[in-house]
Image (cartoon, rainbow, N blue to C red):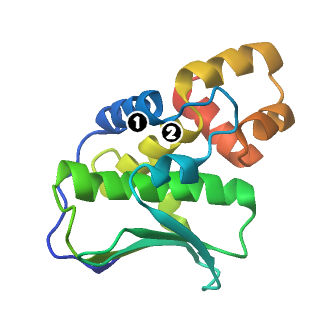
Amino acid sequence: MSLKNNKKPKIFSQDEARAAAKAILQAYWKSSDLPIDPEEIGAYFNVRFVEIDTDDDVAGGIYKKSGYPPLIFVNDRDHTSEHRLTKGHELGHLYLRQVVNNERDSTYEYMDLRATLIRDDVNNAEGFANAFANELIMPQELFEQHWKQNKDFFKMSSIFGVSINAIKRRLEELGL
């Protein structure tokens, strides 16, 4: 849900979102350890992250003021496993704005309601951000390797630092 939009961002496909996340991981995730820390990746882009007290239906969002680094916020009432994917999701929105649409020094605000985080529409910003976050936090190659070894929702949740529901959605997305 956009609070302030200077212009409607150009949207790329979910495949392009996954490719972008994969390229970012290769360039900026220097550790082979799991779970992947989206804050560590965001630091390369001067992104600040904060937890805030907000309405229950708000999962997270971005605030970007011209001349200042982007700020990604997450709901402080959510579990850290939810924060990980929400931060990845917001990094996906930031990628759309700053890289795809070249709005590096624009001012904008963006807030995601819980209901939009689970949407999987192919041709919209939420679908892009979801695909980006899933590949960033649960990279397909690593996810498939661990699933073949474990086939255990709790273990996978622990390995990737996300909820069991996120593991189930990723399995469905990958057709596993």
Q: Earlier in the sequence, mark 2 or mark 1?
A: 1
Q: In this view of the protein, can residue 112 be seen by the observer?
A: no
Position of 133 compared to 14: left or right? right
Q: Where is residue 74 in the image (x, y as percent from the top left)?
A: 58, 70
To which quarter of the image does residue 70 belong? bottom left
Q: Where is residue 2 in the image (x, y as percent from the top left)?
A: 32, 75
Q: Which amino acid does label 2 sit on?
A: Leu
To which quarter of the image does residue 63 belong? bottom left
Position of 106 compared to 112: left or right? left
Q: In this view of the protein, can residue 99 be seen by the observer?
A: yes
Q: Position of residue 84 (x, y in %)?
A: 63, 53
Q: Is residue 110 above or below residue 85?
A: below
Q: Which amino acid does label 1 sit on?
A: Ile
Q: Write the residue at 40% across / 36% down.
A: 24
**In the rendered structure, are the residues bearing label 2 and label 1 in contact, judged by CB atoms less than 8 Å apart?**
yes
Q: Which is closer to the viewer, label 2 or label 1?
A: 1
Q: In this view, does 23 lie above or below 88?
A: above
* Labelled disc at residue 108: none
121 vs 46, nearest the viewer: 46
25 vs 170, nearest the viewer: 25
Query: For mark 2, does the 10 Å Cα neighbourhood hold few (<14), some (14 to 19), or many (20 or more) residues?
Result: many
Write down the residue under mark 2: 136
To which quarter of the image does residue 58 belong? bottom right
Secondary element at tag 2: helix
Q: Write the residue at 16% across / 55% down.
A: 101
Which quadrant of the rendered structure holds the C terminus? top right
Position of 83 compared to 114: left or right? right
Query: For mark 1, does the 10 Å Cα neighbourhood hold few (<14), some (14 to 19), or many (20 or more) residues?
Result: few
Write down the residue under mark 1: 24
Q: Where is residue 54 in the image (x, y as percent from the top left)?
A: 60, 85
